Image (cartoon, helix red, strand yellow):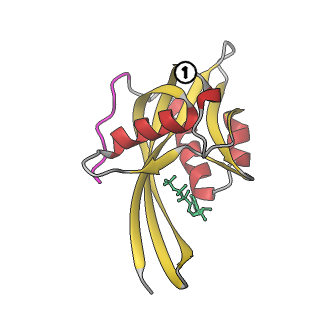
């Protein structure tokens, strides 16, 4: 079976309300709740892709604060009668919300939702993304996010 390899990058966008509660931006595509992300283009660093894709998909302006994690998964698609195996790696960054309008989301996205971080941890469709948000939660509760943009991860 033919295998294709893909690299994407995305973000966990957070904001704090007046009571200090943490909210996370999540995209809904049909019945799935997921983190915004997209394919790394030629010559792009994963950090650049992550910021670009998050801004395009959600309509939000963001500032990257930390590298969180790299996840990977497999999926299978039939293309012209041939079953093709896909292996995707996704680099996720923690990103602070800086403004923008979530109604200006990408047309591939049905809705952008702000969820309290604990609700995002329950409702995100993929376990690996829930683990990334758990990592973001630990960073934010410890105040470990940097004020400077993080160094991009290789890849
Ligand atoms: P990208 O956002 O990287 O441009 P895409 O939207 O074209 O990609 P994916 O989100 O990678 O495609 O979805 C391809 C397949 O993988 C779908 O069947 C989707 O349900 C599944 N999938 C997406 N994310 C995960 C994940 N974290 N774990 C397991 N399966 C996933």
Residue 27 in sight from this viewpoint = yes
Residue occupied by mark 1 = 100
Q: Vertical placement of 134 versus 4: above or below?
A: above
Q: Is residue 50 left or right of residue 16?
A: left
| Percent of width and height locating residue 119 | 73, 39
Q: What SS does tag 1 mark?
A: strand
Q: Residue at x 58, y 45 (%)?
A: 35
Q: Magenta region, mostly helix, strand or loop?
A: loop
- Quadrant that contains the N terminus: bottom left
**Outermost residue toward the top in this view:** 18
The span shown in magenta is 147-155
Residue 141 in sight from this viewpoint = no
Q: Residue at x 57, y 34 (%)?
A: 58
| Percent of width and height locating residue 117 | 66, 35
Residue 148 within the magenta-colored segment of the rendering:
yes
- Residue 87: image quadrant is bottom left
| Percent of width and height locating residue 100 | 55, 21
- Quadrant that contains the C terminus: bottom left
Q: Is residue 9 left or right of residue 28?
A: left
Say which of 39 and 22 sits in front: 39
Q: What is the total number of numbered labels drawn onto the structure image?
A: 1
| Percent of width and height locating residue 109 | 63, 43
């Amino acid at each position: 079976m033919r295998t294709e390899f893909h690299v994407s990058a995305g973000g966990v966008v957070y904001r704090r309300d007046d009571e200090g509660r943490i909210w996370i931006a999540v995209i809904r595509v049909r019945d799935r709740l997921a983190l915004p992300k997209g394919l790394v283009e030629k010559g792009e660093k994963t950090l650049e892709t992550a910021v670009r894709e998050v801004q395009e998909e959600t309509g939000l302006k963001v500032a990257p604060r930390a590298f969180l994690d790299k996840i990977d998964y497999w999926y299978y698609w039939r293309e012209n009668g041939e079953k093709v195996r896909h292996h995707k790696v996704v680099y996720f960054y923690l990103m602070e919300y800086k403004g923008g309008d979530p109604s200006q989301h990408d047309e591939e996205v049905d809705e952008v939702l702000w969820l309290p971080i604990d609700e995002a941890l329950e409702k995100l469709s993929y376990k690996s993304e829930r683990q990334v948000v758990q990592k973001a939660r630990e960073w934010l509760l410890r105040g470990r996010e940097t004020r400077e943009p993080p160094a991009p991860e290789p890849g």
